[in-house]
Image (cartoon, coloured by chain):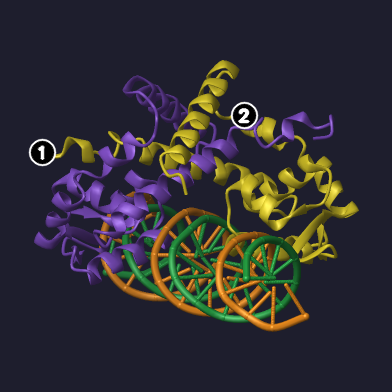
Chain colours: A yellow, B purple, C green, D orange
Amino acid sequence: MTTSFPQLGLDAQLCFPLYAASRAVTRRYSALLAQAGLTYPQYLCLLALWEADDPMTVGELGARLRLDSGTLTPVLKRLEAAGHLGRRRDPADERRVLLEVTPTGWERRDRVADVPLGIASGMGLSEAEAAQLRSLLDRMLVGLDDSVPD
Amino acid sequence: MTTSFPQLGLDAQLCFPLYAASRAVTRRYSALLAQAGLTYPQYLCLLALWEADDPMTVGELGARLRLDSGTLTPVLKRLEAAGHLGRRRDPADERRVLLEVTPTGWERRDRVADVPLGIASGMGLSEAEAAQLRSLLDRMLVGLDDSVPD
DNA sequence: CACAATTCAGTTGTGCACAATATATTTGTC
DNA sequence: GACAAATATATTGTGCACAACTGAATTGTG
């Protein structure tokens, strides 16, 4: 690197390690999830819906995953086509679409139950380090939210 | 969340905070880079090429950024179309394509020089925390590399 | 030299992300 | 109760990511 612009070094910024690490983890998940017929974003949708227990709207899911309807709608349609969830308009407010996991969708849960452990073991971080990393990432997210008050 | 499958909690896994934080940071960069006519992956390509100083092959760039030719080729073509870099076959080995930043491409460097600082200030982490985060992410990447020896 | 194996970039196809926009529904306000 | 403003989702268009494949160029081996 030329000595000028040291702040433009790939490794001097947080963004690149973050971006590369995120893609590496997603890739690793994808390989395991493919065996269950799921992509990573589809898996995230199911995680959120499994957690909620009750039917959830597209907007609520988007708020949880920080994804907009332009991303979610096609993902949800593929999950519906695969029989993992049902989508129906909320009778009480026809603008909303309620997402409900089907029995087939609940079965996926057992199928992927051991995926996270499989990833964690290959990651080379202790439980304490993982917790520390989670904490730093959470604080970063909050910081980014706060500095753009919508 | 139902009490079974605690390991499937969205926040229990590292992947989701990592994924959400990475997208949040990329989004923030994109907003600033758009003013310079660059997308985030295009910016990463230029960062790597600026660092190298000498012409670089597509393969070398891919190794640095951890991206494959299927991703890079269209990005590089757009950078070429914008006049930021030149692509030519290596006369010594016609399989390779050499990437060279044009004068116009070098000018982009001044244009984006203050972008990283603008991001960092909004991130709410101290310099020490940022360094710690970088270190954890790097070790994670190494761990993931090691556990899949290609 | 012949030629199989390897390397390198490009192409194709699928699936996100996200901005901008469109459309339908609901909610205030008068 | 009309109707403007707000809300919720869907659609469109652009640009990645990445797996799988193609084809050209190079290298290793006999």
Report which quarter residue C15 is drawn in. bottom right
Q: Are marks 2 and 1 on the same chain?
A: yes
State whether residue C24 is above or below residue A8.
below
Write down the chain letter for disc 1: A
State whether residue C2 is above or below residue B110.
below
Marked residue nearer the N-terminal end (2 or 1): 1
Query: Quick one: D7 or B107, which is closer to the camera?
Result: D7
Q: Residue furthest top?
A: A128
Q: In front of the other: label 2 or label 1?
A: 1
Report which quarter residue A85 is drawn in. bottom right
Element class at badge 1: loop
Q: Position of residue A49 (x, y in %)?
A: 76, 47
Instruction: Give the position of the N terminus of chain B as an image quadrant.
Output: top right
Q: Residues within 10 Å of mark 2 (few under 14, many from 20)?
A: some
Q: Position of residue A144 (x, y in %)?
A: 44, 39
Q: Position of residue A61 (x, y in %)?
A: 68, 51
Q: Residue furthest right?
A: A103
- Residue A24 seen: no
Left or right, A83 with reference to A65: right
Element class at badge 2: helix
Where is mark 1, residue-wise? Answer: A4
Left or right, D7 with reference to B45: right
Write down the chain letter for disc 2: A
Q: Position of residue B147 (x, y in %)?
A: 54, 32
Q: Residue B56, which numbered label?
A: none
Query: What amino acid type is highlighted by mark number 2?
Result: Ala
Where is mark 2, residue-wise? Answer: A120
